[in-house]
Every structure is written in C-alpha cells, then in structure tokens.
Image (tube, rainbow, N blue to C red):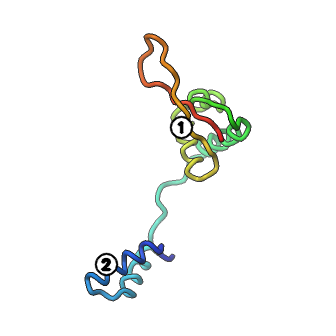
Amino acid sequence: MTISASVQEKAKTFAKTNKISQSKLIEFLESLSVGAKPVGRKASQSTLEIRQRISKWLDENKGKSFTMKDLAKHVNASALDATNAVKWLQQSNKASVQMVGKLDKLPGQRGKRAAIYCVK
C-alpha cells in the first residue's frame, strides 16, 4: 500500500528539518501502512436494507422537500437510522440531499425546530 502525496511531502520536510534520510523515512511509513487494518466495522444487514430503501425513495422523490421524521415513516425506520443512512449516502456520493430550512414552531410547541431537506 502506498502513502498519499501529502504524507510524502510532510515526510520529506520532516526528514529535511531533522536531517534524516527521506527514502528510509518513506519506506518506514509505507511499511506501517501495509499492516493497517481498515477503520470501522461492517454495516449490519438491517442498516444495508434501510440504506437501500432510502436511496430508492430519494431517487423517486427528486425535488421534493421532507423532514427526517417524514422520511423515516416512508421507509419504516427510526429517525436516527434514517438520519445516519442519509449522511452515509451523502458522504459516499450516492445521494444529493441539502438542508433548505426549518419548520416553523406552532404556539406552545417545545424543542428544536425540525430541519427541512430537499433532494437534488
């Protein structure tokens, strides 16, 4: 496994300032990255199913606005699972969802205002 260009540049400047061999330092860093385990754990089957249902729902409802509670009702999941799945889909560039505003509070309503999202 090779190290990224930015890490190589940092290693070169570190080696130069500390008078260490650049090639040996880069070899050492590459040897460390070979044994590195991937970060995180695999998603459970239920999480994968929720992601798939949300992805399908988002594809069908492009241009529509929704709250996470609405989305959770449509895909039959908890609001927390829906939020996490949408964040994962955004980070992996599989969905384009943007926050466009917040719901107005009704008189006497407590708590935070719900965010309104839109599918691009």
The quadrant holding residue 35 is bottom left
User: Residue at 37% across / 87% down in the picture?
Assistant: 24
User: Residue at 58% across / 53% down in the picture?
Assistant: 92
Residue 69 against residue 88 in the figure, above or below:
above
User: Residue at 58% across / 43% down in the picture?
Assistant: 47
- Using the numbered discs, state the Cα–Cα distance from disc 1 to disc 2 in whole angstroms: 41 Å
Q: Secondary structure at mark 2?
A: helix
Q: Residue furthest front?
A: 100
| Residue at numbered disc 2 | 14
> With 44 as the anchor, is 33 left or right in this view?
left
Of tags 1 and 2, which is closer to the observer?
2
Q: Secondary structure at mark 1?
A: helix
Q: Callout 2: 10 Å neighbours few (<14), some, many (20+)?
A: some
Kind of residue sitting beneath label 1:
Thr
Where residue 18 sits: x, y (%)?
A: 25, 82
- Tag 2 or tag 1, which sits nearer the N-term? 2
| Residue at numbered disc 1 | 83
User: Residue at 42% across / 73% down in the picture?
Assistant: 7
Rendered image: mark on residue 40: none
Where residue 28 sits: x, y (%)?
A: 38, 81
Q: Residue furthest top?
A: 108
Residue 16 against residue 111 in the figure, above or below:
below
Q: Callout 1: 10 Å neighbours few (<14), some, many (20+)?
A: some
Kind of residue sitting beneath label 2:
Phe
Where residue 85 sits: x, y (%)?
A: 57, 42
The quadrant holding residue 116 is top right
Where residue 101 sits: x, y (%)?
A: 53, 31
